[in-house]
Image (cartoon, helix red, strand yellow):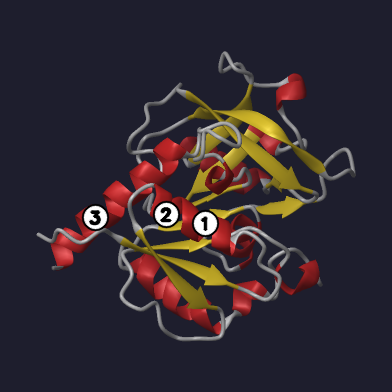
Amino acid sequence: MTDAPPRVGVITFPGSLDDRDALRAVETMGGEGVGLWHADHDLRGVDAVVLPGGFSYGDYLRCGAIAGHAPILDDVKAFARGGGPVLGICNGFQILCEAGLLPGALIRNASLRFVCRDVFLRVETSQTPVTSELVPGEVVEIPVKHGEGQYVATPEQVRMIEGEGLVVFRYANSRGEVGGAANPNGSLADIAGVRNGAGNVVGLMPHPEHAVDPDVGPTGGQPLFASLLATALERAGATA
């Protein structure tokens, strides 16, 4: 075992906007934030990896399409294959989908407008690195800010996602009811976040890193980062 805080790497891509916010959230919640660079082949021995929000490569081709082939993604894939916890936030979610680490894709919002507001998310599973401190049915409030956050998938992927319980969060109202105006972007089945089959890779469109400080907004991101740090600490202890 180790008394050191878990080390969480946050990757900066050209066009990342929320890498510093993610690092600050990790530090605020008691972890050690470690900056990582997209062009490197070095995760610096971190216990968890975060792909932050922003507009990597100016969203050319498709959101996350170029970043999905960044050199460091080879190392992220190897880390994920080894069971390492990986979190993609907004653009990070898009990158994980483009890299084949998560099913489905993110396209233009149904409204064709950029959306920026607080939303409620209903937790669908506790079997992930970011929901281990939460219970299914629990509701958290977290902001969104995106123009291409509509989650879509093929019929075959939908059957797999729903059948294997890969949905992590759904957009809902404060009572946990899904549908209607609670969905800010038209996402299929109100999906706000999904995981891989092993459960260690998670992507979501809302921004938990912007929801840890009670002085500036909701704090629904706190249990997500607490979960991530607990998972990372367990991994650090297992490998110490």
Q: At x 70% / y 21%, what residue is drawn?
A: 179
Other residues around mark 3 within 10 Å, as few (<14) / some (14–19) / many (≥20): many
**Marks 3 and 1, how far apart at CA:** 18 Å
Other residues around mark 2 within 10 Å, as few (<14) / some (14–19) / many (≥20): many
**First along the sequence among labels 2 and 3:** 2
Residue 47: x %, y % from top left: 31, 64
**Marks 1 and 2, how far apart at CA:** 6 Å
Question: Where, by quadrant of the figure, is residue 233 drawn?
Answer: bottom left
Task: Give amino acid for label 3.
Answer: Leu
Mark 2 or mark 3: which is in front?
Answer: 2
Residue 28: x %, y % from top left: 41, 49
Q: Nearer the viewer, residue 106 or 214?
A: 214
Locate the C terminus by quadrant: bottom left
Looking at the image, how many numbered discs can be counted on the residues?
3
Q: At x 80% / y 49%, what residue is drawn?
A: 147
For disc 3, the marked residue is 233
Instruction: Check contact, mark 3 vs mark 1: CB within 8 A.
Output: no
For disc 1, the marked residue is 22
Can residue 107 be seen? yes
Looking at the image, residue 181 lies above or below residue 155: above
Task: Give amino acid for label 1.
Answer: Ala
**First along the sequence among labels 3 and 1:** 1
Q: Residue furthest top?
A: 175
- Looking at the image, residue 100 sits to the left or right of residue 144; the answer is left
For disc 2, the marked residue is 26
Residue 175: x %, y % from top left: 57, 13
- Looking at the image, residue 229 sits to the left or right of residue 152; the answer is left
- Looking at the image, residue 116 sits to the left or right of residue 191; the answer is right
Q: Nearer the viewer, residue 62 or 222?
A: 222
Q: At x 71% / y 52%, what residue is drawn?
A: 106
